[in-house]
Each structure stands twice: as C-alpha cells, then as structure tokens.
Amino acid sequence: MAKIEVLGPGCANCQRLEAMARQAVADLGVEAEVEKVTDVKEIMARGVMATPGLVVNGKVVSKGRVPSASEVKSLIAGALA
Amino acid sequence: MMRQPTLRLWAGMAVAALAWVGAYVILHPIADALTYDLFHLSRDSHLGSAVEFFLYDTPKVLLLLTGIVFLMGIVRTFFSPESTRRLLGGRREGVGNVAAAGLGVVTPFCSCSAVPLFIGFVEAGVPLGVTFSFLISAPMVNEVAVVLLFGLFGWKTAALYVGLGLAIAITAGWVIGRLHMERHVEPFVYEIAVGQLDSAEGLTWSDRAARGIQAVRDIVGRVWPFVVAGIAVGAAIHGYVPEDTMAGIMGEGAWWSVPAAVILGVPMYSNAAGVLPVIEALIDKGAALGTALAFMMSVVALSLPEMIILRRVLKWRLIAVFIAVVASGITAVGFVFNLVF
C-alpha cells in the first residue's frame, strides 16, 4: 500500500493539504494511507524546511505551498505511476 | 512544439496587462459617474464625497493588489527557502543581515513554517542574528502592506515603510547577533539531522504564471473583505467625525503615543489587511501617521502565536530580547515618521 505523508505543524495550510490529499486518494481510487507528520524533527529529516510538505512513498513532491486540488491529484498519481 | 504554448502564454499575459491598465484608467470616471449622475449625490455633500471615495478606492486598491500579488507570486518562484539558506550560509554579520532582510521580502514564507526554517538556517551555519533579520523582514515587509499603503496614503508612505522596515530587520538582527545569545537556543536545534534539501524544481514560465495566479487566488481571496471594510471605514469617517478627536491622544503632540501603540500591537495578530480598518479610522480621526504605522508594524511583525511557535526552538530569554529589540526599532521608526510628515 502506498504511503502519503502531509508534513506540517498543524496550521490551516497543512490541514487544507491533508484534506486535498485524502480527496485525491479517494478520487484516484488508489490504495494509500494518508498520514500527518507534525514533529519538526521528522519534518526536517525528510528534507522539508517550508511547510506544508507532501511526501509520497518517501519522496517529497511538494513543499512550502498549498498546490491546487488538481495538482495534488496529479502529483500523487505521478509519484505512484 | 515548445514555442506554441510559450507564445500563447505571453500573448495572454499581454492581453491581461492591457485589460488591467484599461480598467485602472477608467475607474475614476466610472466612480464619478455612478456617484453624481446615477445616484444624484451633490458634489459638495459629505455623503457624495464619501461614496465617491469608496467607489473609486475599493476597486483601485483591489486592482493594485491583484497586479502586485501576481507579479510577486512569479518573483517568488525564483527563490526558495533552500536557495536563501544556501545564499546566507556562513555569511558574515553585517553584509549577512542586509542580505537576509532583502531575501526575506522575496522568499516565500509563512509564519507557520518559522520553526523548520529556523532550524534549517542554523544547521546551514547562518549566524543567529542573520537568521533573525530574515525572520523580522519576511512577515513585515510584504506586498500586501506595501500596496495598501501606496493605494491609500501614497508612494512616499509606502517607500518609507519598506525602507524603515528593512532598516529595523537589519539593525535588530545585528543587535541580536552582537548579544551572542546562541546558548539561549534550545540545544536540540544543533543536533537535528536535516535530510537532503533540494530545491531545483525546473519550472517553466507557464508554471510560474500559474503560481502567480494561485497567489492571487490565495492572498486576494483572503484579504479582500478587510480591504473593503478598511476603505468603508475610511469613507464613512471621512467628513463625519471631527478630525481632531484622536489628535489629543494619538496626535504628534503626545510623545508617548508611539510606544503605547507599539506595546498594544505586540500581542495582537493579524495581517496587514486586517489592521487596515483600524489604521484608517485612527488616521482619519487625527492620529499621527507614524503612530498608526508603528501600530501596524508591531501587529504584523510581532505576535503572541508566533512567539509560542518560536518557543519550541528559543528559550524565553531570547524571545524577550527579540521582542524588546524589534519593538524598540518600531518605536524609533514611529518617531521618525512623525517627524518627517
């Protein structure tokens, strides 16, 4: 199963991205677990300095901004392809 | 194949720019016609001038905001926290403070990522004071504040805000660096293992334009109610409230009004657009411009939520010094403004 992580301390932007990631997973119909990472040490360890970050199977696909819903979908689809 | 979309993109941008200029030019005649011809308000009445002020200034400021936010959204695609960190790493104080304050303006920044950014900077060997110059300038000197000040108070006020805001960021960061407070940073910051920070995204121009449009949707979509409210307050007060209501308390005569405004603003949290209605009201009632701007700067630059976030990496002593140094800088700027205007 794919693993999708949303990195961020829990601000509004991170929550928006998390909701979008869940929606994208549902829309794409892929088997994926969406997890929130709030610990700053864990965030830094993944190489993200600007939150929110989106990580698919260990690969950072977006950071420092909230992409649009359609972009989130294509980022996740692209990383899983 | 590569040329076609690029050509279409530039053509689209040119059309949008022309439409923008066209809209900007006809705003005043339209506001004039609506107020005096359609609504039949008298040119000499308070109501007439208030309505015209509102109908002209609201679309003007929103247009300016859209244009500048779009351009800044594109400029920001050329910078990233990672590249800024690389540029500032190992830089000496002084030059480093100046560079950090400047980069704070153009690097994408959200106060909710202040902690990972702080750790990333420290890890790259950016001196503590230089990091603070960045953290002060990034939220304070931003395009929303500049556009609002330009649209409502003119370019001199906007330019002074930018210049003095940068001066505060540079000086306050330098002072914090001179105080050698490295041991007041939480020790875990120095031990954290930072993963590979890679920033090369390989964006095309159409990606950059899309980011610009997204910035407009995000920022203008969020601040427009405050802008409308701010201008409405300004328009409503315009002519109705005696000009010197506030002059005794916050006018140039009362020297203590600047520090009082700064202290009041420190714990408050808002973006530049959110304080706008208050600023408009204060100035229209006779408060001095420097006092009102000092209030705005302290609301935007220092806030209780940000301190709580920073507490995760800084000890209280350093947070207290940070607040004290920045607040003193803002107070000094308020006095300068009141002297100049």
Image (cartoon, coloured by chain):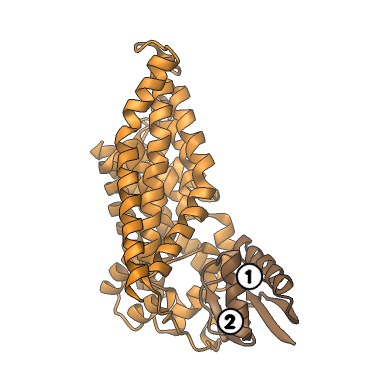
Chain colours: A brown, B orange
**Same chain? Circles 2 and 1:** yes
Which secondary structure lies at badge 1?
A: loop
Q: Amino acid at mark 1?
A: Pro
Q: Tell me the quarter of the image containing the N terminus of chain A.
A: bottom right
Residue visible at 41% across and 73% down in the picture: B80
Q: Amino acid at mark 2?
A: Gly
Q: Chain of mark 1?
A: A
B38, A16: nearer the viewer: B38
Residue visible at 66% across and 74% down in the picture: A38
Residue B314 in sight: no
Residue visible at 30% across and 54% down in the picture: B14
Q: Chain of mark 2?
A: A
Labels 2 and 1: the sequence-earlier one = 1
Q: How many marks?
A: 2
Q: Position of residue B110 (x, y in %)?
A: 50, 63
Q: Are marks 2 and 1 in contact (CB under 8 Å)?
A: no
Using the rendered view, name the quadrant where residue A31 is placed.
bottom right
- In the picture, measured across the screen, residue A4 lies left or right of residue A75, that is right
Q: Which mark is residue A78?
A: 2
- In the picture, measured across the screen, residue A5 lies left or right of residue B206, that is right
Which residue is the site of mark 1? A9
Crowd class of label 1 (few under 14; some 14 to 19; many from 20; radius 10 Å): many
Q: Position of residue B58 (x, y in %)?
A: 43, 34
